[in-house]
Image (cartoon, helix red, strand yellow):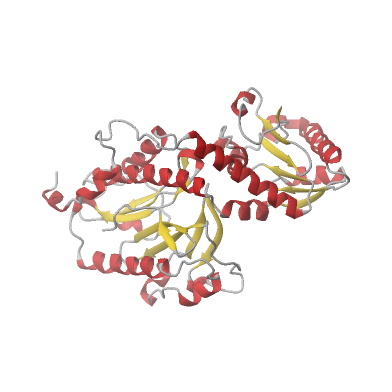
Amino acid sequence: MSPNTAFKDDRKLTYLNAEGASKPLKSPVNDDVFTRARAYRFGRLRAALDRSDCAALLLYDPCNIRYAFDCSNMQVWTLHNPMRYALILADGPAIMFEFKGCLHQCEGLLGIDEVRVARTWMFMASGDKVGAATDAWADEIAGLVREFGSGNTRIACDRLDGSGVYALEARGLSYVEGTQMTEIARSIKSADEIELMRWTVRVCEAGMARIFDHSHPGVTERELWAHLHFENARSGGDWLETKLLTCGPRTNPWYQECSDRVCQEGEMISFDTDMIGPYGYCADLSRSWTCGYTQMNDRQRRLYDTALEQIHHNLDLVRPGVSFDEFNDKSWRIPEAHVPYRYSLAIHGVGMADEWPVVPLHVDWGAGAMSGRFEPGQVVCVESLIAEEGSESIKLETQVLVTETGAERLDSFPFE
C-alpha cells in the first residue's frame, strides 16, 4: 500500500455499511411509500392523458412502463427488443401486455386492470411472418381504442417503430407523439418518490465508497467500475447506463469508456455513475480524486477548484420560478482555456433515468435551447467538466431537488 494513504479521507468510508460492507444495505422504505408513489405516478399519466385529447397512451419505453405500473420485467433487454408494452385508455382500462410466460410479474400491481400476452411483431421474433404479426398487433390495439374511445381515434405513443405507426394509421388511428406527455408527467416528483430516490443515492454512494476504498496503484479502470455494479446489484438496483470511469490521460478527452488500463499513483480517477438503482430511480453523480490518495499537484488542484466553483455557482441559481433563459444568463462562465474540453450542458433533469429538461452550457446556448423554468418537485443534476490542453479531466456532478424555497442536494458524498 502506498505511503500516501495517510491522506486518505476516512469520511468517505462511512458510506459503506456498518458491517464493513460484508452485506448489502437494507432499505428503510416501507410499503406505504410504495403504494403512495405508485398511485401518484399513475395519476400523473392519467391526468396528462386527459389533457391531451387522446383516447389512449401506448407505452413501450420500459422506464415509462415502470413509472406507470412499477413493473420492471427484463428492462435492459426490452430497451432494444420491443416485446412488452402497456396501453392506458382514457375512458377504459389500463392493460399490461407482458412477455409470454411472465404474466405473473404483474400480479398485484397498482393501476393494472388487465394483463394480456404481448403480441411480438419485431423481425427477430417474426422473421418472414412479420407482416402478419404486425397486423394482429395493430388489430388488437385499434380494437381497444374503438371500444373505449367514444369515436376518438388519437393515440399517443412514447416510442414506436415506423411499421407500427403505419399499421395503426391504416386502421384509422391518428398517431400522436407521446414522449412530451411522459417526460412532463415524470418531471415533478412526489415526496414519496424523493424518499425512494434518496435510497438509490445512498446505495450509489456506498458504491462510490467502494471505488474510493480500492483506488490503489495497480488497479484497473474496469476493476474500479465493477464495485459500483456490485453494490447496485446486491441492493436491488437495475443497471448502469454508461461505463464512464477513467484515470490519468484517459480522462481527457471525456467520454472514453473504462478499460484495462492500470491506474498509476497520483493520477486523477474521474467517473460518472449514471446508475439506475433500487426502485428504478437514477443516481447520477460524478467525482474525481487521485489514485493512491495522494495530495493533488498544483495543476490538479487548480482544475478541481475551477470545477467546484462552477458547481457551487450554478447550484445557487437553481430556484423555483427561475427560467432556463434566466439561468443561462446568470450561469458560471467557463474560462476560454477549458472551452474545447467542456461538458455541453450545465443542468439536466433526472428521475428514472436522465430526463427533461436539458439546459445547455452557456457556450452551447442558442435558438434551439428549450423553454421552461425550474419547478418544485423537479430533480436536476448540476454538471461540471474541467480540463485544458494536455491535462486530466475533473468531472463533478451533484443531484438536486428543487424545493418551494430553493434547492436541496440529495447526495452528500464529500468533494475533495
Q: Quadrant of the N terminus?
A: top left
In the image, residue 245 lies at what x, y percent?
36, 50
Give the residue drawn at x 54%, y 72%: 365
Position of residue 219 in the picture relative to residue 360 (left or right): left
Q: Quadrant of the C terminus?
A: bottom left
State whether residue 229 is above or below residue 308: above
Does residue 40 appear in the picture of this structure?
Answer: yes
State whether residue 33 is above or below residue 6: above
Instruction: State the count of labels.
Output: 0
Give the residue drawn at x 69%, y 52%: 48
In the image, residue 12 lies at what x, y percent?
25, 48
Residue closest to the eye, 327 or 198: 198
Residue closest to the eye, 28 or 359: 28
In which image quadrant can residue 235 be found? top left
Does residue 389 appear in the picture of this structure?
Answer: no
In the image, residue 286 lies at what x, y percent?
37, 54
Residue closest to the eye, 155 or 287: 155
In which image quadrant can residue 103 be found? top right
Position of residue 258 in the picture relative to residue 361 (left or right): left
